[in-house]
Amino acid sequence: MKFYTTTYHSDLIKDTNRLSAFLEGIIEVSNTFNNFKNIDKNNKINENINENEDKNNENNIFNLKNKINFEKKKNSRIALDIGCGSGVLSYFASKCFDSVLGIDIDEKIINYAKKSFFNAEIENVSFINDDASSYDFSKLFNVSNLDNDSIFEKFTDLIICEMLDTALINEEEIPVLNNIQKYLKNKDNVKILPKGIINVAEPVFMEKDYINYEDEEFHGNKPQYEILGGPVKYLELNFLDNIDPAVETVINFNLNDFSSNVNTDNFDNNMNKDLKSHFNGIKITTFTLITDNILCGPTPMFNPPLFVPVPNINTVNETNNSNSNYIKNEKKHEKNISLKLEYLMGGGVETIKTKIIN
Ligand SMILES: C[S@@+](CC[C@H](N)C(=O)[O-])C[C@H]1O[C@@H](n2cnc3c(N)ncnc32)[C@H](O)[C@@H]1O
């Protein structure tokens, strides 16, 4: 199938690791309903797509041939794809579900998605351009005699919500999930994909003295860094739970000796290279629980690890250098450090705060 997309959504489509994880997840969930239709192997995703192809038509609205009737029929399966972008996950779902509805806040990509599916003559998928964090989902269904808070379990079988980014800090996954919660009473009756995430932090000696991603293609050269201790899981979220977007946690690290051959000559940090051990930041990695059986780590376009500097280390008293921006471990044995980490999920990286507390 040929997808019309923006440059950003085209990059998402090219990330085949990300796509395979979600395709497997959609197939796994739909198999639990026993109605999986074979995905046409000839229907390959066209990777050579960008917005220029459709410059002249980008403001047109492309209506699908037939509007989907979202009234739930007996034995029919309905999937929602929230933050659907180009509709690539809607496309996978269209092979396994009777009806699929995609929603995205970006008008341009919704118009492209409508065009792609119209041209491909896929008639069981429709799209809405709206903000899913405030959208009134009762408008979709004929629910006059029903409580709003059970709409999703009565009318949908799968909710796909791939609006993820590392630690869910920039994207609006959590505000959107919290809106979805209003329409869910019995969570056993609906499936969500991904199921949740696991966040892990590692203490590092990092190159930059500002927040940056380990993502060569989109954020410049890959940053250099040295891992100084074992990973610590600090947050696990199940997407069907009520989730407080404000994260406030204390992470306990064991620091090891600084040992590698990282070349620090070009590091932004004003650091004393004689020191054998440094701690000036954390690396946050997000693992996505697509389903109970599929755990997906970072892929090129999916959750590149995030480096966060730890600026106020002077409160830890092991250094002789009061101006130092790092920790010196003169004894060269493991050292315990407690770090307070705060941020608002959906609030952007500017909400991140770190502080050594012990
Ligand atoms: C990481 S992209 C994923 C796109 C698509 N799910 C895919 O797998 O290719 C996240 C998408 O969420 C959309 N989005 C962000 N905030 C939204 C909101 N509040 N309501 C609806 N869509 C939103 C963006 O426009 C973007 O297309």
Image (spheres, rainbow, N blue to C red):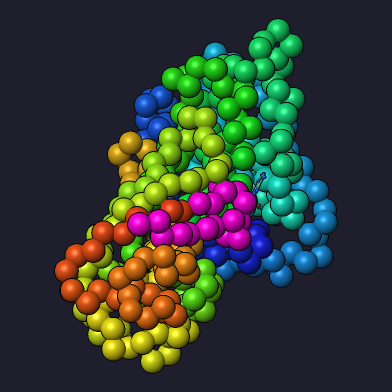
Quadrant of the rendered structure where residue 152 is?
Answer: top right
Question: Looking at the picture, how far across and down is residue 272, in whole percent?
Answer: 36, 87
Side of 49 where 263 appears, left or right: left
Side of 36 where 113 appears, left or right: right
Quadrant of the snapshot with the N terminus: bottom right
Q: Residue at x 65, y 60 (%)?
A: 5
Q: Residue at x 62, y 24 (%)?
A: 182
Where is 20 relative to 126, above or below?
Answer: below
Question: Looking at the picture, how far across and down is residue 63, in whole percent?
Answer: 77, 42
Question: Looking at the picture, how far across and down is residue 113, in whole percent?
Answer: 67, 50
Magenta-drawn stretch contains 122:
no
Where is 70 relative to 302, above or below?
Answer: above
Quadrant of the snapshot with the C terminus: bottom left
In depth, the one of 299 and 251 nearer the eye is 251
Q: Residue at x 43, y 35 (%)?
A: 238
Where is 211 relative to 223, above or below?
Answer: above
In depth, the one of 187 and 83 nearer the eye is 187
For the magenta stretch, what is the residue range? Answer: 342-358
Magenta-drawn stretch contains 355:
yes
Quadrant of the rendered structure where residue 71 is?
Answer: top right
Residue 123 in sight in this render: no
Residue 349 in sight in this render: yes
Question: Looking at the picture, how far across and down is residue 167, in whole percent?
Answer: 47, 52
Q: Residue at x 55, y 43 (%)?
A: 246
Side of 90 where 63 appears, left or right: right
